[in-house]
Image (cartoon, rainbow, N blue to C red):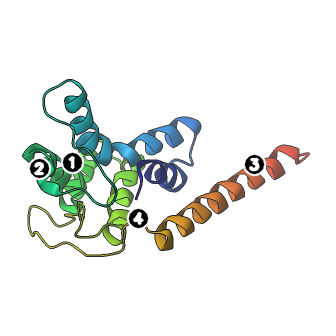
């Protein structure tokens, strides 16, 4: 899934308590991609490695530095997510629900990534099992994704307008 869809789903699912909660979940929803591909693009812009040239289709994974796959494995693992979620819960003595946007990011990526380009290593480091599915950029996934986001936020806006115009 694209980074903005992850943010919007994360905010809608785990950020409904307050504006702060929404923005926290929104940014946590994009963080797995920011902490892997964001680091990759930033280090490339800083000249620490070459940035691959994309000429349509999926690029060859060999074009990417090894550290990107390591970061991707860490940030896209349900095992790592659950461990961190539980550690934070133990420290805070209550769950940090906005962190659920990270777990949702992984769950949405599993059926929207193919073997061609960064399949989701959701069981890493226990297993290298990955699901081969339809890429999120395929119109069969991309168009329904946009429609679902419009429906979710359209409903939210409609509810807000109804509650705002209510006399009570």
Q: Which residue is mark 2?
A: 70
Give the number of the mark in front: 3 or 1: 3
Q: Earlier in the sequence, mark 3 or mark 2?
A: 2
Give the number of the mark in front: 4 or 2: 4
The reply to whether dot 3 and dot 2 touch (C-beta < 8 Å) is: no
Q: Earlier in the sequence, mark 4 or mark 2?
A: 2
Q: Marks 4 and 1, how far apart in space?
A: 31 Å
Left or right relative to 33: residue 46: left
In terms of secondary structure, where does tag 1 sit? helix
Q: Marks 4 and 2, how far apart in space?
A: 22 Å
Give the number of the mark in front: 4 or 3: 4
The disc at residue 160 is: 3
Q: Nearer the viewer, residue 165 or 38?
A: 38
- Judge the density around disc 2: few (<14), some (14-19), many (≥20) Cα neighbours within 10 Å: few
Q: Marks 2 and 1, how far apart in space?
A: 22 Å
Q: Nearer the viewer, residue 97 or 29?
A: 29
Please tell me which residue is depicted at 56% across the width and 45% down the height of the picture: 17
Q: Nearer the viewer, residue 4 or 162?
A: 4
Percent coordinates x, y for residue 99 in the rendering:
36, 48
In terms of secondary structure, where does tag 4 sit? loop
Q: Marks 3 and 1, how far apart in space?
A: 35 Å
Q: Which residue is mark 4?
A: 136
Residue 69 visible here: yes
- Judge the density around disc 1: few (<14), some (14-19), many (≥20) Cα neighbours within 10 Å: few
Please tell me which residue is depicted at 51% across the width and 47% down the height of the picture: 15
The disc at residue 87 is: 1
Percent coordinates x, y for residue 34 in the rendering:
31, 41
């Amino acid at each position: 899934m694209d980074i903005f869809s992850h943010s919007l789903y994360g905010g809608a699912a785990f950020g409904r308590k307050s504006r702060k909660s929404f923005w926290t979940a929104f940014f946590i929803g994009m963080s797995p991609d920011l902490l892997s591909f964001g680091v990759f693009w930033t280090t490339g812009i800083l000249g620490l490695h070459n940035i691959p040239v994309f000429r349509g289709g999926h690029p060859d994974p060999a074009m990417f530095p090894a550290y990107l796959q390591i970061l991707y494995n860490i940030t896209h693992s349900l095992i790592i997510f659950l461990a961190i979620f539980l550690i934070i819960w133990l420290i805070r003595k209550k769950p940090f629900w906005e962190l659920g946007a990270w777990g949702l990011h992984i769950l949405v990526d599993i059926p929207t990534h193919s073997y061609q380009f960064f399949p989701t290593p959701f069981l890493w480091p226990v297993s290298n099992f990955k699901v081969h599915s339809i890429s999120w950029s395929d119109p069969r996934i991309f168009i329904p994704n946009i429609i679902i986001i419009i429906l979710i936020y359209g409903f939210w806006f409609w509810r807000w307008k109804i509650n705002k115009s209510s006399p009570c």
